[in-house]
Image (tube, grey):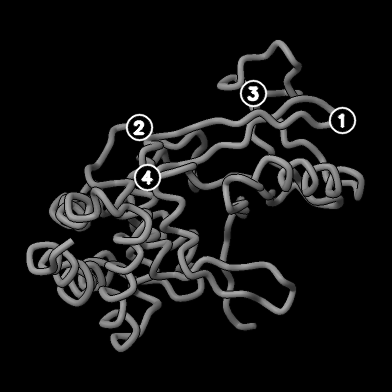
Amino acid sequence: RALTVRTKDIDCALFPRLAAVDAGKDVAEELLAQGWRHRPDREHGTPGVATTPVESLPVVRLYPPESEEWFIELLTVPASEKETGKHWERLELSGGHYALPSFEFMSIAVFVPTKTEFGIYCASPEMMALALLLEHSTIKPETMGGLIENRRIKRSNKDLGRVLAIARLSSEEAIVSWPAVWEKGLRSCFPSRWRRLARSVGSGLRRLLQSQPDLEEAHHTCVYGLLRSRPATVEELKLAGRRLLQDAVEPVEHARRQIKP
């Protein structure tokens, strides 16, 4: 109760994929009926219509009935390991048309989730970290759509900063157990290319730790987000990253050379 985490959105992944569209319609319609509201942005002031191309539809982003401080977003997992990049499914709701996106590594994020007392599953921190590491094997130039505490931040730095925050908040005992579940997740979700993916698990993180400007951007997102209640210095984040490389990343990179597929 003494800790505070600041977030602007809560990602809600619907899986398995075969049930995601119908489930997405049910969830969205129920929330709208309870007073949740469409969150407009610069491109999507209102929901789309039947003639709107699916890639131009707004994602289901809904404010709760009495707040605009945060929102939920609906998304799903890829249909298979062959579905790379970003993919869209159309959701036809009573109030308009939306898109249900899937991302290449979302299946990793929801691998062996924890079931809560409410029947909702939560992604484990270590699998969230792995999904972000895979997504950002390089530092891409694209920036976030909005400012983070008055700064324009690269999306890669924001997401890799989340990885550092997770590592910072996790015990050494927990992190040394991550390689086993990471490898299991990679082999299960990407059976034909897990070795290639394992090879690049630490690439983006290494680039981040070697670039002071990028590391400082990641630090900025941490102190105003996941680490707001437990602020860390840039050097402390760098140490957390080095520990993560040593205790979790390098064992996975090494395992792909030793274990037969």
Mark 2, secondary structure of its residue? loop
Could you tell me if the residues under marks 3 and 4 are in contact, i.e. CB atoms within 8 Å?
Answer: no
Q: Residue at x 49, y 42 (%)?
A: 79
Dot 1 or dot 2: first in sequence order is 1
Residue 142's disc number: 2
x%, y% of residue 64? 80, 51
Q: Quadrant of the N terminus?
A: bottom right
Q: Amino acid at mark 3?
A: Leu
Mark 3, secondary structure of its residue? loop
Q: Residues within 10 Å of mark 4 (few under 14, many from 20)?
A: some
Name the one closer to the observer, 90 or 140: 90
Q: Quadrant of the C terminus?
A: bottom left
Mark 4, secondary structure of its residue? loop
Mark 1, secondary structure of its residue? loop
Q: Nearer the viewer, mark 2 or mark 4?
A: 4
x%, y% of residue 166? 39, 69
State which quadrant residue 3 falls in.
bottom right
| Vertical placement of residue 160 versus 74, above or below | below
Whole-Å distance between the Cαs marked 1 and 2? 34 Å
| Vertical placement of residue 140 versus 165, above or below | above
The residue that label 3 is drawn on is: 57
The residue that label 1 is drawn on is: 94
Q: Residue at x 23, y 67 (%)?
A: 241
State which quadrant residue 201 falls in.
bottom left
The residue that label 4 is drawn on is: 81
Q: Amino acid at mark 1?
A: Ser
x%, y% of residue 7? 58, 57
Instruction: Tell me: 37 left or right of 260.
Output: right
**Labels in figure, total:** 4
Name the one closer to the observer, 233 or 37: 37
